[in-house]
Amino acid sequence: MVPVEYFFVLSALLFFIGVFGFISRRNLIAMLISVELILNAVDLNFAAINRIVYPGALEGFFFSLFSIGVSAAETAVAVAIIINVYRNYHSDQVNSIENMKW
């Protein structure tokens, strides 16, 4: 059986890779993928904490499923916005959105 600490290390690694990707990228799709990595790190924490606190119950897994559903809806909306930005500005870079300020 895999120790729970390994899940926390993996979750922290996923979280920091997602934060680094979000900060360092200028492509909207790459930024969206980085946000999804962060949300997956949170889901992994839900499952690992559930394993520690309630070994026989499934509360953490239900929280993870709910979070996955919310992140799927968020991704669908974000992809629709990115497609709209690409149609209007012919670019998927963050710098092209600065034209929308005024």
Image (cartoon, grey):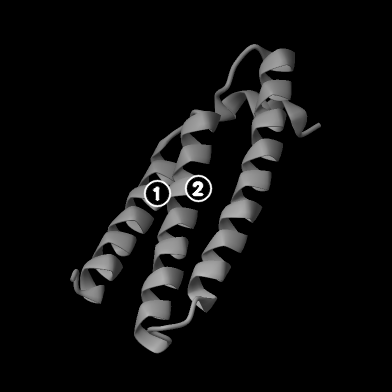
42 vs 87, left or right, is left
- SS of the residue under disc 2: helix
Comes first in the chain, label 1 or label 2: 1
* Residue 24 position (above or below residue 20): above
From the image, tell me which residue sits under label 2.
35
Q: Where is residue 6 in the image (x, y as percent from the top left)?
A: 21, 68
Mark 1 residue type: Gly
Mark 1 touches mark 2? (CB < 8 Å): yes
Image quadrant in which you'd find residue 83:
top right
The residue carrying pointer 2 sits among few (fewer than 14), some (14 to 19) or many (20 or more) residues within 10 Å by Cα, namely many
State the residue at coordinates (50%, 76%). Answer: 58
The percent position of residue 64, horizontal first and vertical second, equals 52, 64
Quarter placement of the C terminus: top right
Q: Is 26 in front, or is 13? A: 13
Q: Circle 1 sits on which residue? A: 18
Q: How far apart are marks 1 and 2 (CA)?
A: 6 Å
Q: Dot 1: what SS?
A: helix
Q: Residue furthest bottom?
A: 53
Q: Is residue 5 above or below residue 19?
A: below
Which kind of residue does numbered mark 2 sit on? Val
